[in-house]
Amino acid sequence: MDDIEDIFVARLMTTDLHTVTPDTLVEDAAAVLLDNDISSALVVEDDTLVGILTTTDFVDIVAKSQPKAETTVERYMSTDPVTAEAQDTVTSVAALMVDHGFHHVPVVDDDGTAIGIITTSDLAAYVSTAEAEASA
């Protein structure tokens, strides 16, 4: 892993974001995840990131309440999400993920606006590619 170049988050993050609002019904949020084959949605209010809702949260939803209609995302989303900035290094974000046990880290600009997301899948793909190139 010593041969892997430490790059900025901006090079790996996904910018095709799928968002919901705190008052989105959980059924609708689940549809966003399923329809887009993604494992998290960013929760935004007035263009500001206020939370994140992941497939892990849906396990919690089903286990705790077997939600009825009219249940909103706000009840289950993780609030005050730990974020990264586009110029953070990949190694610092990877360390953050390991320290907190996260699989998704939203990327925000100086105003707190979500501009991307970086996931463990993004990091794994980068490491795999970098190692393949290093051994070629």
Image (spheres, helix red, strand yellow):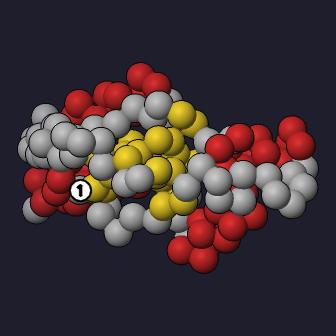
In the image, taking residue 78 as reference, residue 4 lies left or right, namely left
Name the residue carrying label 1.
Answer: 12
Q: Is residue 49 above or below residue 78?
A: below
Q: In the image, residue 117 lies at what x, y percent?
A: 35, 53
* Residue sticking out furthest to the bottom: 35
Q: Is residue 127 visible?
A: yes
Q: Is residue 30 visible?
A: no
The kind of residue tagged 1 is: Leu
Q: In the image, residue 80 lies at what x, y percent?
A: 47, 31
Give neighbour class at mark 1: few <14, some 14-19, many 20+ (Cα, 10 Å): some
- Residue 14 position by quadrant: bottom left
**Number of numbered discs:** 1
Residue at the (11%, 53%) spot, across then down: 134
Quarter of the rendering occupied by the N terminus: top left
In the image, taking residue 62 as reference, residue 52 lies left or right, namely left
Quarter of the rendering occupied by the C terminus: bottom left
